[in-house]
Amino acid sequence: AASTYVDSYNYMLADSAWVGDWEGALESLQDMRNLGVPPDVTSYFAAICACRRGGAWEKALELVEEIWQKDLEPDVECYSHAIQACVKAEAHDQAAKLLKELRSWGPAPEADRFHTTPMMKWMREMKQYGCGVRNVVNWKGQGPLPQAPSRPCWLLPNQDDVAIQFAEQQAQLRHAGWKVVNVSPEVVTMLQNKAELMKYAKRIGLGAAIPRTYESSEEAEYPCILKPAVGTFGKDTHVVRSSEEVDRLSRGESLTSKWVLQELIPGRLEHSTTLLVKDG
């Protein structure tokens, strides 16, 4: 029933697009929201076309943003018409920005080579990797396994706790049709603990390739970084300037098992990267 409502509104939106009635198109989108009928990519595409023909380039840009915010994935046509709307209005900077993003999608933007889970609202950023990676699967390691695409595709965890579930259920995931990394749960558990990872790096002779760590607050060179051994997104991470501050924030817990105290690398920018490693 819901799809029937969407189809009906999409016909109306197509009529608005044909005559450039961008105000009517936006009203139709709002009617859909008010009725609890979520617009799909086809709905937004028609509205963007109406904006292009009606000269409402700023509204076209807003619609592109809204598509991503709704966890949908705009296609090449959505971007192409938004770019044309900008060019028509001589908004060349905005057109160039969209065109640069569109080109970053690579030669096969519709290809599915990698899926990451759970959903983290990273779809737009991942699309720009240009290698067919998507973030539309929301499996967190519990419940029914996610359905695999018809073609072979990698399923990759993007959170530590989910990575452990992957390692424990890798046989089932493969049976369900996914390609998954072959790794033991013990290795994943070690890798998610920053303190254990630092120790492991030193054991295999890579200590010089990682930030220097301190086993006690007394030996540290301040300012430095204090962060939990287990955690993501910088939660409870602090720049500390004295051993007293370390003791207060760590509540006296062991630095070698519960916390990591490491050198502060100064700079204006922080770089984060994702690696898929083959053969170690």
Image (cartoon, rainbow, N blue to C red):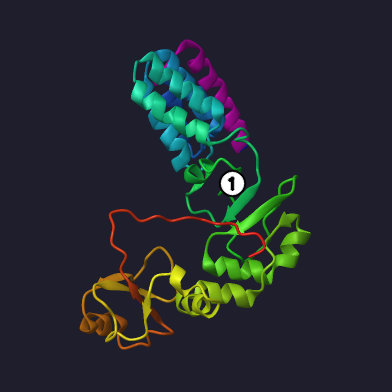
Residue labelled with disc 1: 133
What secondary structure is the magenta-colored segment mainly?
A: helix
Q: Secondary structure at mark 1?
A: strand
Q: Residues within 10 Å of mark 1 (few under 14, many from 20)?
A: many
Q: With 247 as the anchor, is 65 left or right in this view?
A: right
Quarter of the picture holding the C terminus: bottom right
Rendered-image quadrant of the N terminus: top right
| Quadrant housing residue 97 | top left
**Front-most of 28 and 60?**
60
Q: Is residue 165 above or below residue 38?
A: below
As drawn, 277 above or below 8? below
Q: Position of residue 248 (x, y in %)?
A: 25, 83
Kind of residue at badge 1 = Val
> Can the viewer see residue 200?
yes
Q: Residue furthest right?
A: 175
The residue depicted at 60 percent of the width and 35 percent of the height is: 109
Instruction: State the image quarter where residue 7 is shown.
Output: top right
- Residue at x 75% of width, y 58% of height: 176
Residue 274 place in picture, x, y as percent: 51, 56
- Magenta span of residues: 2-23
Q: Quadrant of residue 95?
A: top left
Residue at 34% x, 25% y: name it.
Answer: 93
In-front residue for pair 173/10: 173
Residue 120: x and y, percent?
Answer: 48, 54
In the image, residue 90 lies at what x, y percent? Answer: 34, 16
Residue 257 is left or right of residue 224, and the answer is: right
198 left or right of 167?
left
